[in-house]
Amino acid sequence: MYGPKNHGWIEAIVGPMYSGKSEELIRRVRRTKIAKQKIQVFKPKIDNRFSKMDVVSHQGEKEEAIVVENAEEILRFIENDVQVVAIDEAQFFDENIIKVINYLADNEKRVICAGLDTDFKGEPFGYMPNIMAIAEFVDKFQAICMVCGNPATRTQRLIDGKPANYYEPVVLVGAQESYEARCRKCHTVPKNNGVR
Ligand SMILES: [Zn+2]
């Protein structure tokens, strides 16, 4: 292998939906391939809505990924000579994601984690804040607010076209769900106990 060996570190790519996180992850994955570095890409098993084995950006670009049930399973798939480990949708992993990525970085892997930093309520999402804290490098991206055009840092959840309630269950059967990127001012989360 050419060039110096990585010392190991963690990079976090965060932001709301439509801010280009997956595009950026795919861009970094492609740069490592151009440099002939060995990379493995992982994502958590969430559901079957999207292509199972690919990290897919909204532009339809894709890279192959290994789908794992939990954070520890990543270590079972890691090949000895891998130099770069990319993890998409990192906000959906359990607390062991912190141990796993620290272990990888301590063992001279470059670790790239992409994910949502806040959920639809505008609150810190899963272990993403912890990943941002232990990462050497954090890139926080903005989208454009679909209401007013200012920089969007939040993900607006809409159910049947109306802002989702704070207490709305994550899975709603029979409702039309959609998401928009919004700024702090236009992000709306009614707290009226389930009444829309
Ligand atoms: Zn706005």
Image (cartoon, grey):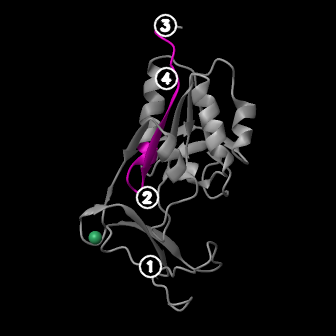
Marks 1 and 4, how far apart at CA: 42 Å
Q: Which residues are drawn in magenta?
A: 2-23
State the image coordinates of residue 148 (x, y, percent, origin top left).
24, 71
How many numbered circles are shown? 4
User: In the shown orientation, is residue 147 left or right of residue 157?
Assistant: left
The crowding category of the residue bearing disc 4, from other C-alpha atoms within 10 Å (few below 14, some 14 to 19, many at least 20), is: few
Q: Secondary structure at mark 3?
A: loop
Q: Secondary structure at mark 4?
A: helix
Marks 1 and 2, how far apart at CA: 16 Å
Which quadrant would residue 103 be assigned to in this image? top right
Decide whether residue 13 is among the magenta residues. yes
Mark 2 or mark 4, whichever is nearer to me: 2
Q: Which residue is mark 2?
A: 17
Mark with earlier residue (3, 4): 3
Name which residue type carries label 2.
Met
Mark with earlier residue (2, 4): 2
Q: Nearer the viewer, residue 45 or 59?
A: 45
The crowding category of the residue bearing disc 3, from other C-alpha atoms within 10 Å (few below 14, some 14 to 19, many at least 20), is: few
Q: Which residue is mark 1?
A: 189
